[in-house]
Amino acid sequence: MSFPHHLNLYRFVFPDFKTFEIIICDQPLGSNVEAVKRILFNGEGIWLEGMKEWFSEEVREYIKKYHRIVKENADCFTTLYPEPLVPTLVEGVYANKFPQRKDGKGKVIWTIYNTNPFTVDGEIMAVEYEKGARFWDVGEGKEIKPVIKGGKAYLRLKLPPKEVIVIKKEGRI
C-alpha cells in the first residue's frame, strides 16, 4: 500500500498538539490551491500572511471554503482521536477520520483526497453504519444517500482529480 507523501503523521501521533502549516513564507502563494487542499486533508490549521494580491482568486475562494468547513466542524477537527489513512475502496483515494468521540458514535468527519489524475465516480468508502445516521458532503452542503449492506454504509461519490472533499456523518449518541 502506498500513501500520499504529504500526510502529516505528526498531526495524528500527537493529536493534542494542533499544527498550523505555513505553505510559503514571505512571498506570494499564487495559484497553489493544492497546497491548501493538503492542509484540509490533514485537518490542520493554516498560517496566512501577505496581501490579497499574493493569492489567486481560486486560492482565496478555497481558503474561504476551508475556513468555513473547519470552523463549522471544530468539534471533530480538534478531536484527540484522529485516524490517518482509514480504508477506502479505490486505489489512489485516501481518507482521514476525525471522530467527535473516541467510540466513533455521533458526529464524524472524513477528509478524502483523490490523488489520481482522473475523476473517481463510484463507491469510494464503506464505513460503519449506525441506525439513523445521515451523511453530508460538507463543501457542497448536499446529503449523501449511502447504500446500506451488512452493517456498512457505502458512500458513492464523484471526486475530481487532485480534489479533497469533506464528508460528515451525523448520528445519534
Image (cartoon, rainbow, N blue to C red):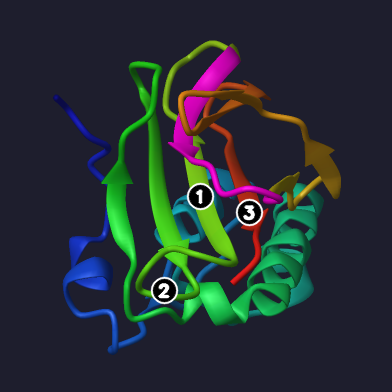
Q: Mark 3 points at which residue?
A: 169
Query: Quarter-wise, where is residue 55 in the image?
Result: bottom right
Element on which disc 1 rests: strand
Q: Please name the amino acid that badge 2 sits on.
A: Ile
Residue located 60% across and 80% down the image: 74
Q: Identify the mark nearer the N-term, 2 or 1.
A: 2
Residue located 50% across and 74% down the image: 100
Element on which disc 3 rests: strand
Density class for disc 3 (Cα within 10 Å; few <14, some 14-19, many ≥20) is many
Q: Identify the mark nearer the N-term, 3 or 1.
A: 1
Q: Please name the amino acid that badge 3 sits on.
A: Lys
Q: Does the magenta stretch include residue 4?
A: no
The magenta span reads 122-133
Q: Mark 2 points at which residue?
A: 22
Residue located 55% across and 17% down the image: 123
Q: Is the C terminus in the top left, top right, bottom left or bottom right quadrant?
A: bottom right
Residue 81, position in %: x, y?
32, 73
Q: Name the residue under label 1.
A: 111
Residue 53, position in %: x, y?
76, 66
**Callouts 2 and 1 close, C-beta under 8 Å:** no
Query: Quarter-wise, where is residue 119 in the image?
Result: top right
Question: On screen, 128 above or below 138?
Answer: above
